[in-house]
Image (spheres, rainbow, N blue to C red):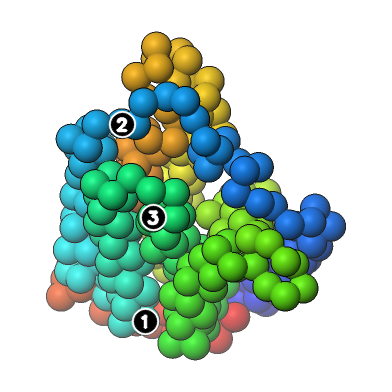
């Protein structure tokens, strides 16, 4: 138990240092305006037909529904179950916002459609840390902060602030890429009271591929003969990430069938944290 406690504290110190370094890097970068991102620049390419925009969002909506059902029946820990349900609800909201954006097709709507997904990613990061470090990562205050993070990032992205004088996407980008900061940390090897590291790594790989598609928006459009850009295909890979987590949750015993020792393991991890 002392070695587990030491590993947890070391991982926590490394996590805090990494997050502080990432924030410092963003502050040093300066404001990032909408025109700086490939998927927010004006394009001469014809807009994606509404039917295609709707179809590309449906797998993400299906993954959100599957994850919500799996979390409700398979997660025995009440705090983790609440966090999972909120996360998948936000994923579903992101899919619905994407469908609305496909119908409306305006730049501001496109930005607003990303906000539920940003909050969902923040919650998933908290869940991963709660499974390995301490249940406090999914305490009500932490979940509230995760829920508010997307709208706060959106307010900063749309209006900026008096100290900036312009819209700034840095917080939104930081939230969307937050799980990638966990990759080099030592928390993967810590004992988990939830999903295994392999399930998270596969979901993280799909998430990273989705953001690469966004950054390569014009390149993908050219490769596909101008039919569709990389940003429009992002929901498919986001659906793969959410679907992998939903499938992993579904493989777990249901909450009613969870072994009696599960609560004891959870208690020992709480003490170790």
Image coordinates of residue 76 in percent, x first then y, are 27, 75
Name the residue rendered at 39%, 63% in the picture: 116
Q: Which residue is mark 3?
A: 109
Measured in 3D between alpha carbons, the distance from the residue under mark 3 to the one under mark 2, in whole angstroms, is: 15 Å
Name the residue rendered at 17%, 63% in the picture: 69
**Helix, strand or loop at mark 2:** loop
Measured in 3D between alpha carbons, the distance from the residue under mark 2 to the one under mark 1, in whole angstroms, is: 41 Å
Measured in 3D between alpha carbons, the distance from the residue under mark 3 to the one under mark 1, in whole angstroms, is: 33 Å
Of the residues under marks 2 and 1, which one precedes in the sequence?
Answer: 2
**Helix, strand or loop at mark 1:** helix
Can the viewer see residue 24 in this picture?
yes
Name the residue rendered at 48%, 77% in the picture: 148
Label 2 close to label 1 by CB (< 8 Å): no
Q: Which residue is mark 2?
A: 48
In the rendered image, the quadrant that contains the N terminus is: bottom right
Determine whether, in the image, residue 243 is placed left or right of residue 137.
Answer: left
Q: Residues within 10 Å of mark 2 (few under 14, many from 20)?
A: some
| Foreground residue among 61 and 169 | 169
The disc at residue 79 is: 1
Q: Nearer the viewer, mark 3 or mark 1?
A: 3
Q: Residues within 10 Å of mark 1 (few under 14, many from 20)?
A: some
Can the viewer see residue 132 in this picture?
no
């Amino acid at each position: 138990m002392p070695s587990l406690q030491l590993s947890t504290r070391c991982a926590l110190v490394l996590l805090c240092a990494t997050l502080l370094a990432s924030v410092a890097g963003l502050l040093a970068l300066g404001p990032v305006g909408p025109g700086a991102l490939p998927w927010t620049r004006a394009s001469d390419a014809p807009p994606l037909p509404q039917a295609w925009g709707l179809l590309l969002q449906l797998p993400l909506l299906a993954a959100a529904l599957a994850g919500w059902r799996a979390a409700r029946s398979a997660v025995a820990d009440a705090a983790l179950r609440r966090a999972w349900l909120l996360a998948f609800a936000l994923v579903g909201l992101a899919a619905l916002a994407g469908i609305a954006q496909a119908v409306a097709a305006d730049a501001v709507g496109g930005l607003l459609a990303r906000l539920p997904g940003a909050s969902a990613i923040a919650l998933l990061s908290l869940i991963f840390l709660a499974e390995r470090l301490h249940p406090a990562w999914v305490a009500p205050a932490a979940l509230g902060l995760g829920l508010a993070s997307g709208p706060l990032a959106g307010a900063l992205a749309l209006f900026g602030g008096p100290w900036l004088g312009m819209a700034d996407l840095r917080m939104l980008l930081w939230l969307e890429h937050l799980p990638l900061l966990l990759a080099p940390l030592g928390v993967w090897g810590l004992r988990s009271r939830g999903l295994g590291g392999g399930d998270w790594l596969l979901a993280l790989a799909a998430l990273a591929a989705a953001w690469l598609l966004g950054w390569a928006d014009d390149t993908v459009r050219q490769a596909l003969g101008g039919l569709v850009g990389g940003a429009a295909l992002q929901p498919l890979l986001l659906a793969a990430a959410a679907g992998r987590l939903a499938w992993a949750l579904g493989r777990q015993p249901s909450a009613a069938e969870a072994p009696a020792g599960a609560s004891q393991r959870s208690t020992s991890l709480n003490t170790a944290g």
